Amino acid sequence: MSRLLYTLVATTLVVAPGLTWAASPPGAASCLGCHTVAAEGGPVPALGSFTAEQMVTAMQAFRSGSRPATVMNRIAKGFSDEEIKAIADWYARSKSK
């Protein structure tokens, strides 16, 4: 009986994260190459410290060049307004879980 329990727990730990990322909008996973969701104090701001509206505003400013950046201006140019909003909304929902 305990072997079955261990197998179920192990399967859940392996499969569940994949299901979460599968439900993410295109492009959302790429943010984690530099940003964390919850950890603070790193060289790059944590996504969990922003509201969806703040993320959208920042991404649009990076894309237009009105907010200085070393990398984010180039990354933001690859996303449409709809994609930016979907990613921002998804991260805002994810941080509350």
Image (cartoon, grey):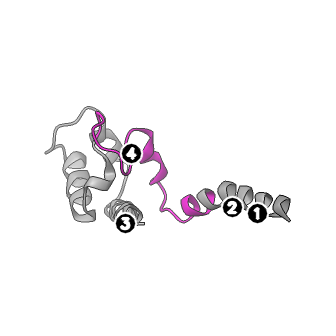
Q: Position of residue 41 (x, y in %)?
A: 27, 38
Distance in Å between CA atoms under marks 2 and 3: 21 Å
Q: CA distance from mark 4 to mark 1?
A: 28 Å
Percent position of residue 15, x then y: 68, 59
Q: Residue 39: say if magenta.
A: yes
Label 4 vs label 1, nearer the camera: 1
> Residue 12: which disc?
2
- Asked if the stretch drawn in magenta spans residue 41, the answer is yes
Q: Residue at x 79, y 58 (%)?
A: 7
| Upstream in sequence: badge 2 or badge 3 | 2
Mark 3, secondary structure of its residue: loop
Other residues around mark 4 within 10 Å, as few (<14) / some (14–19) / many (≥20): some
- Image point (38%, 67%), residue name: 93
Query: For mark 3, what is the residue?
Result: 96
Mark 3 vs mark 1, foreground winner is 1
Disc 3 residue type?
A: Ser
3 or 1: tag closer to the N-terminus: 1
Residue interval drawn in magenta: 18-44
Query: Which residue is painted at 22% across and 46% down in the image?
Result: 62
Nearer the camera: disc 4 or disc 3: 3
Evaluate if marks 2 and 1 touch, with contact meaning CB atoms under 8 Å apart.
Answer: yes
Asked whether, in this view, residue 61 is left or right of residue 88, the answer is: left
The residue singled out by tag 1 in the image is: 8
The residue at 21%/52% (across/down) is 58
Residue receiving disc 4: 36
Q: Quadrant of the C terminus?
A: bottom left
Q: Position of residue 85 (x, y in %)?
A: 33, 65
The N terminus: image quadrant: bottom right
